[in-house]
Amino acid sequence: AAWAADFPLASHHAALQAAYERCEPSPSVLQRDVAETLDSLGWTHVEEHVTEDGLSLDVACPETRRAVEVDGPWHFLRDVHGASCVENGSTRFKSRLLRRLGWDLVRIPFFEWYRLKTTAEKEADLRSRGLSATKKRRLP
C-alpha cells in the first residue's frame, strides 16, 4: 500500500500483518445478539469482516460496503457525573476513517440495545436504522 513507505515500522509490515491475521476474533454476546437479529431480518452479512485496508468490522455486507459496529462500554467515555456517554477518540476516528473509505456505517451503542427487551423491539430498532433485507447498491 502507498501508506507503507511513510509507516515507521514499514520494514515489519509483513510480520505485523501476519500476527494480526493469526488473532482469532471473539465476538461479544452483544455483537452476536445484533448479528442474529440481522439474520432474522434477512440482512446478508459476515461477522468480523476485515476490509482491504485492514480494518476489522463487527458485522458487514462487503458487497454494499455497509457495516454495523456494535459498541460496548469500552467505546465510550462518561462525563464526571456519569450522566452521559460520548464516543471515545479511537471509536470516532475509526468511524471517520471508514466513511472516508466509502463505508456506510451504522453504530449500535450497548446502552441503546440493552433497553430493547423483545425480538420485535430489536428488529424495529434495526429497521429504523435502515437495516433490513439487503438491497444491492452500486459501488462507486
Image (tube, rainbow, N blue to C red):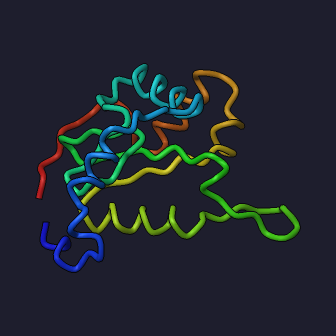
Residue 15, image x, y percentages: 25, 53
The residue lying at 71 percent from left, 61 percent from top is: 85
In the depicted structure, whether residue 119 falls above or below residue 94: above
User: Residue drawn 42% across and 35% down?
Assistant: 25
Residue placed most toward the observer, 2 or 118 = 2
Instruction: Relative to 78, say whether 57 is above or below.
Output: above
For this orientation, the residue located farthest to the bottom is 6
- Please state the horizontal and vertical placement of residue 24, each as a whole percent of the image: 40, 33
Image mark count = 0
Residue 93 screen position, x and y as percent: 45, 69
User: Residue 1's quadrant in the figure?
Assistant: bottom left
Q: Quadrant of the C terminus?
A: bottom left
Q: Residue at x 32, y 53 (%)?
A: 55
Name the side, left or right, on which 56 lies relative to 51: right
In the image: residue 130, left or right of residue 128: left
Where does residue 100 sit, x and y in percent of width and height? Answer: 28, 68
Residue lying at 19% horizontally and 52% vertically, measured from the top left = 52
Quadrant of res 49 = top left
The residue nearer to you, when weighing 82 against 41, is 82
Q: Quadrant of residue 122?
A: top right
Among all residues in the image, which is located at the extreme right? 81
